[in-house]
Every structure is written in structure tokens, then in C-alpha cells.
Image: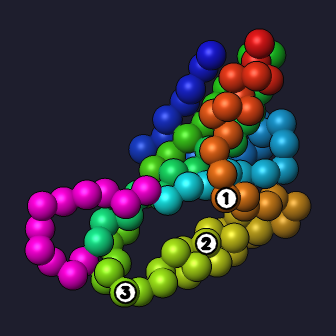
Amino acid sequence: MIVIFCDNIDDFIGFLEKRVMGEIFYEFKEITSNSLSSKVDIEIILHFLAKVEGTMALYETKQNITKSSNSDIDKEVVKTLEKIFSSVDPSLSLIKGKIREIFLSYSS
């Protein structure tokens, strides 16, 4: 199994041409901290399947955002990501979920 992690979302987008499906999967993870602050750190993980010289690869990137504990920034982030991916290829769809299990069964 090959997993390629891109530190920069622009690099991640650059590899979209290698994808084997029209879906980009995303998931949100709350990053726990010991702070009593009203701010919450959220990690957004994006991933898709691609072919690299005939081998299946999982491309992945992470982005961190901070939100206030009572805000609904998740929907705003998804809308922004949809606009970004739509400008690259209008046929791309953003799906909430994990692709790792699909990848493992697809590659065996």
C-alpha cells in the first residue's frame, strides 16, 4: 500500500489528475487541548485514490482550523472546499467519510 501525504493543499490539488474516481473524501477531527479557551482546533483530512505508474496510491492532506466552540464553521469549510475542487474539475464531489477501508479492500 502506498500512501502519499501532501503537506500543502496546492500540491494535493496538483495530483488530482491521477485520481481513479470522482470523489474526494473528507473527515473532521477535533484536536483536544488542555486549554480552557472557547476556541476549538479542527483538523480536516482530505484523501482520494489515484494510480501512480500502475500502482494504487492514497493521496492525503490535512489542514487545521480554529473555530469558536459554538460556531458551525464545518459547513463553511465544506462549501469553500467544494468551490476549490469545482474550479479544478466540476465533476469532483466531496464526500464525508474515510477511504482507508475502501483502499485496503480495493488494493488486495
10 Å crowding of disc 2: few (<14), some (14-19), many (20+): some
Q: Secondary structure at mark 3?
A: loop
In this view, the residue in front, 108 or 23, is: 108
Residue position marked by numbered label 1 in the rendering? 96
| Relative to 57, residue 7 above or below | below
Q: Secondary structure at mark 2?
A: helix
Q: Can you see residue 1? A: yes
Q: Measuring 11% from the left and 74% from the top, which residue is drawn there?
A: 36
Q: Earlier in the sequence, mark 1 or mark 2?
A: 2
Q: Earlier in the sequence, mark 2 or mark 3?
A: 3
Residue receiving disc 3: 70
Bin the neighbour count of mark 3 within 10 Å (Cα to Cα): few under 14, some 14-19, many 20 and up: few
The quarter of the image holding the N terminus is top right
Q: Give the numbered dot on residue 78.
A: 2
Residue 61 appears left or right of 95: left
N-term mark: 3 or 1? 3
What type of secondary structure mainly makes up the magenta span? loop
Give the x, y percent position of residue 4: 55, 30
Residues at badges 1 and 2 in contact (C-beta under 8 Å)? yes
Q: Helix, strand or loop at disc 1?
A: strand
Amino acid bearing label 3: Asn
Disc 1/disc 2 C-alpha distance (Å):
9 Å
- Foreground residue among 16 and 22: 22
Residue 34 is situated, as x and y percent measured from the top left of the image, at: 12, 61
State left or right for residue 34 relative to residue 80.
left
Q: What residue is at 42 percent from the left and 44 percent from the top?
A: 7
Q: Is residue 43 a member of the stretch shown in magenta?
A: no
Model colouring: rainbow
Dividing the picture into quarters, in which one does residue 30 lie? Answer: bottom left
Give the extent of the magenta segment: 29-39
Residue 73 placement, left or right of 106: left
